Amino acid sequence: MKSPARPYFNSEQKSLFPYLFTALFLFALVDSWRRVGVDLPLLFERQGRENLFKFITGMFPPEHSAQFLSLMLRPAMETIQISVLGTLIAIAIGFPIGLLGTRNFSVGGILNEADTSGAPGRYALRFSIYCAARGLLSLFRSIPEFVWAFMFVRAVGLGPFPGVLAIGVAYGGMLGKVYSEIFEAVNARPLEALQSTGANKLQIFFYGWLPQVLPNFVSYTLYRWECAVRASAVLGLVGAGGLGQQIEISMRMFNFNEILTILIILFVMVAAVDVLSSKIRALL
Amino acid sequence: MIDETHGEKVVAMPWPGHMQRSGPTLANVLVTASVVALFVWSYLGSDIRLGELLSREGGGQILAYVEKLFPPDISAATLSQGLRGAIETFAISFLGTLLAVTIGVLIVFFASRNLMYSGLLYEMEAASWWQRSLRMLPYLAAKSLLNILRTIPEIVWALIFVFIVGLGPFPGMLALGVHTGGVLGKLFGEVLEDVDYQPIEALQSTGASRMQILFYGIAPQVLPQFISYTLYRWEVNIRVAAVLGFVGAGGLGQRIHIAISLFLEHQLLTYLIFIYILVTIVDYLSAYLRRKAT
């Protein structure tokens, strides 16, 4: 039991943490500085200054010929399409795996205590399914979508398709993790009530679980969709469709005015998606 | 329904949600229709071959690629390359996040309305309209600067900095710092704009200067949230730092890019394992520090 009057500061319990933290922090700082080769003057040296100047003056005025703009229309739309389908696949991956990776759905809690209490074999099976689901999700989301995209380009060829798969897998991992966190935070009473009426697991899921979590799900998924739009805009750098491809071409050709146009298009697109998704969220 | 004791008709209680179920509203129909249309448009427009993916041939392509990855290359040369790359990636993310905090904190105080021109700190002041608008100028400038920093993706910043300072991890760190600086600036600004006013008012009534109010009234309130947002962004940045090498900005990304381009699949798997370990360590570290800080 906690004592009611705990002193805020107990000088007897001096912890090593601040010293250790400071030492590690300083070590990391010095070592990183050396490894990265931080050379701030480089930014302002003649070469760097000239390049910066060339870059900034090169951006203006932004390329606005009708030809270039119409050329950009398709990649811009492709970016949106990749993000929408990628998010759909992410839901399809994240939802079932996230559900299996939910402790109170697959291992413990009131739903399972009756059928696993006397059966260690069954418990072990369920626990290993739970661990496998967790591990899979963490694998999916630890590898950046960029790397996924490059690998899928190798596996299925250039174009928007590998972009969709990359967003689907990487975001599937993130959605799955958050979904399972939301699942774990549900109020258990409706589930218990349903169970006592003899509802089976599927019924409990649809009538007890889903209504509680749906609003959170939708709003988090929409937030992820906003992120997916940003991500799919740059996946083209490795050949996975969308605006990124053009960014790389323009950068290679030193056509900085085209870069500015693309960035403006990207800004407008992201802003539009933000507005749309907050409108949908407000409807819920 | 008949009440049996009195034999009278009583009004049936509508069950919760009963009223809403009378029929779909126009708004709901429109939203559903447009969402479905968005899906169909996306499917048709981007040559997604879901059928092919699920078919034996398409799935086989991916499986064949996965099989090629195994076994991982565990020669000493690859392992030391992977370790060096992982440490470099860590260094990029660490310094990048520090730079981001610096940029974010420097800009954010100009970009929060209640510190610049309105609210409790200013309401007692009889300022003329041009003084007010003069105060708004840095606010607007700082806000739009943050927007620009944030809008340009890290990888594009990396391209730009590689052009300016040349190849290596240094442009990677700059790219992370600048983009994340914009993101943190926005997040910090939201924290600053809803601080609790009572301590500030109390300090003001003792005659504290604005600087003193900032350090003793505002900073202690916002610091824990600043730290926790920073740690959260660090988790994001470690993943980004791992791919900045794709455009020549050092770290594991560079080695991964080479491995994929030269079809060195076994090496690729080794590097992927390094990313996985690195990301997991940073996630745990950040979660631990966040618990300590808040």
Image (cartoon, coloured by chain):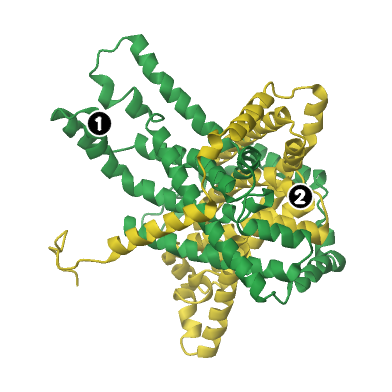
Q: Secondary structure at mark 2?
A: loop
Locate residue A130: give its quadrant. bottom right
Residue A274 in sight here: yes
Provide the chain ID for the residue under circle 2.
Answer: A
Count numbered badges in the picture.
Answer: 2
| Letter of the yellow chain | A
Residue A97 in sight here: no
Give the number of the disc on residue A195: none
The percent coordinates of residue B195 (x first, y second) are 31, 38
Describe residue B173's horizontal placement relative to residue A4 as left or right.
right
Residue that appears at 36% across and 34% down? B193
Give, as a three-letter code, the residue at label 1: Met
* Residue for badge 1: B211
- How packed mark 1 is, by other alpha carbons closer than 10 Å (few <14, some 14-19, many 20 or more), is few
| Letter of the green chain | B
Provide the chain ID for the residue under circle 1.
Answer: B
Describe residue B212's horizontal placement relative to residue B13 as left or right.
left
- For the N terminus of chain A, the quadrant is bottom left
* Residue for badge 2: A240
Q: With respect to residue A68, does B172 lie above or below?
A: below
Locate residue B81: give its quadrant. bottom right
Along the viewing direction, whichever of A108 and B292 lies nearer the viewer: B292
Describe residue A4's horizontal placement relative to residue A164 as left or right.
left
Residue that appears at 80% across and 59% down? A154
Q: With respect to residue A199, does A95 lie above or below?
A: above
Residue that appears at 33% across and 23% down? B118
The percent coordinates of residue A246 (x first, y second) are 76, 38
Along the viewing direction, whichever of B80 and A139 lies nearer the viewer: B80
